[in-house]
Amino acid sequence: MQASEKEELFPKGSDKTYSLMGIVEGEPLQVERGPDNMVMTYPHLVVRELLLFLVVFIVILGVSMVFNAPLEEPANALHSTNPAKAPWYFVGIQELVSYSAFLGGIVAPGVIVLSLLLLPYLDRNPRGVGVWFSGTRKFGIVMFSLFVIVMIVLILIGEFLRGPNWNIYWPWL
Amino acid sequence: MNKATYSLAESIKLLPVNIRNSVIRRGGGSEDQERASVVFGNLFLHLHPVRVHLNTLRLGYTLGLGLISFYLLVILIISGILLMFYYIPSIDMAYNSMLDLEFAVSFGVVLRNMHRWAAHAMVAFVFFHMCRVFYTASYKSPREFNWVVGVCLLLLTLFLSFTGYLLPWDQLAFWAITVGTNIVTYVPWIGDELRYLMLGGTEVGQMALLRFYVLHIAVLPMVMAALVGVHFWRIRKDGGLSRPLDN
Amino acid sequence: MAFENSSGETDLSVETSGKPVAENRRGFVKKLAVTALALGAGGLTVQFGRFMTPNVLYEAAKVFKVGKLGDFPIGSRIVIEGRGVEIVRGKEGIHAISLVCTHLGCLVNPVKNDPEVGYACPCHGSRFAPTGKVLGGAAPTDLPWYEMYMDHMGTLVVDASTVNHKRTKLVV
Ligand code: HEM
Ligand code: FES
């Protein structure tokens, strides 16, 4: 009822490219505020993006001029390398696999991927959006940080503390 | 209305201007309209809205991590295509291709290094980007689906790295893939069949190399490109980057 | 429900009773279409799986000759390179044991200076007794023994496609 009354306050202008679709009760979002805090994409964003590309490219090129990618002996199905390590990002999983192939190699990655996929549907409270480490979601932040830390620690163990025969060794000893 | 002259001499005189105008469309008008037309008149920029919120520019907010991941992907695609000119996916030739790239091809070693280091960096930066999205709660409504797309991108990144790891056909590659594909056999019920399918046989051999190669240079990159497109498109449809409420 | 076109005439509808029947019919057609689509997609997936599964492998044969009895003196342990087996000959007989680690498929190294440990895996540190029994590490099962026999020429043959579950030694 009220809506139709108000509608007449906003007659449709023939020179407007938009029309008012409906009136809703509540605080208007844009009272006396123009399209604030908005800037033109070009040049502001585009220039920054191009600059970032330059930085990334130069860093990668620089690193590639100094450090060579590893290349070992040709593949030999007759002799396992000792120790045989996966690439670093899988070494954490390999560490788990060395305790149990099924739990570490199938169940753990499966659980991780599934929880990541479901996360936004389980944590639906809109608190803290757009704020780094918002204090309103301590639980989530602690849990996720635990996951990140465990992954990193496993990778560090697998990468640096595992020697021949997958025995623990201390690199500084 | 003045009579247009379509004489050849006139056309030649106007050639530079006309060619330029046919390629780049410029809406005249105010400065802002001009700038707007730069964005939506360009295929590569039009994924952007014409205006963005100031928060989007804050490097301290996104840390540029998603964009860095994307740039690494671009570097990987370009360097990867160049490597393909010299790489032969055969168990007799693959390792020699690596040596050729290192010793016989101009800039071969730099390209191989770039491809390798960018791949490592990409895994790390995609992971950091995910952490940024988590710690800024940017996966919440209406961005749930883009988070899901993101998780798929993370998995794709890992698969791409894994398939690429076999290609040099050195000891590192061979045994990492042997171990990696044997993990698959622990999948309940269909583990052995799955490994057979991945390797195209029972051992890491020629069929496995070819399969990994095809996945690495054709199948996975195409899926990746499509999903990155969806990812970017969704950022815009979800109202731009997340930001704290204005007040 | 009758369909009407712009001129207001009733469309050629074979409608007989009322709305529910038409709705049911539409529902049925929809179900039919969805079922056909699902069957088609499922069939396609299965056939794709068949295409991706090679029927012929150019891999080393699983049944292979390893040599004459004289090549394996009593008390010897000889690795057959490229086949992933070791031929062990003791006083009671001879057997072929797999060197492929049951954990994730690395090749185990024979250990010769330790009476307890027969094999050690370099990848994740599994250890096996000389009989193949798991002693420790992540390996879930023992190293299998393969069937072994002597052909009519007197050559020893290992059949790596058949596991010798009873672990019987070939008495010669
Ligand atoms: C190939 C990998 C990926 C690429 C190239 C990529 C690229 C991007 C880019 C360029 C942005 C814009 C903001 C920024 O630069 O940070 C973005 C935002 C976003 N990404 Fe990714 N991303 C990738 C993987 C992921 C992953 C693994 C996730 C999460 C699991 C994810 C979830 C998101 C979400 C939810 C946004 C919106 C963030 C916001 O609105 O603040 N992306 N992505
Ligand atoms: S492969 Fe032998 S212990 Fe893992």
Image (tube, helix red, strand yellow):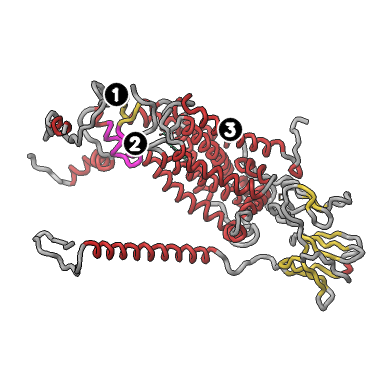
Depth check, mark 3 against mark 1: the one in front is: 3
Q: Which residue is mark 1?
A: A36
Q: Which residue is mark 2?
A: B48
Circle nearer the N terminus (3, 1): 1
Query: Can the viewer see residue B137?
Result: yes
**Can you tell me whether the CB of the residue at mark 2 lies under 8 Å from the nearest atom of ligand 1?**
no
Quadrant for residue B91, please give it. bottom right
Viewer-closest of B188 and A131:
B188
Query: Can the viewer see residue B199?
Result: no
Q: Which mark is residue B89?
A: none
Stretch in magenta: B35-50
Residue situated furthest bottom in the rendering: C152
Quadrant the C terminus of chain A occupies: top right
Q: Which residue is mark 3?
A: A146
Q: Is residue C41 left or right of residue B92?
A: left
Chain for disc number 1: A
Q: Position of residue A14 (x, y in %)?
A: 11, 35
Q: Are marks 3 and 1 in contact (CB under 8 Å)?
A: no
Viewer-closest of A44 and B126:
B126
Depth check, mark 3 against mark 2: the one in front is: 3
Q: Are marks 2 and 1 on the same chain?
A: no
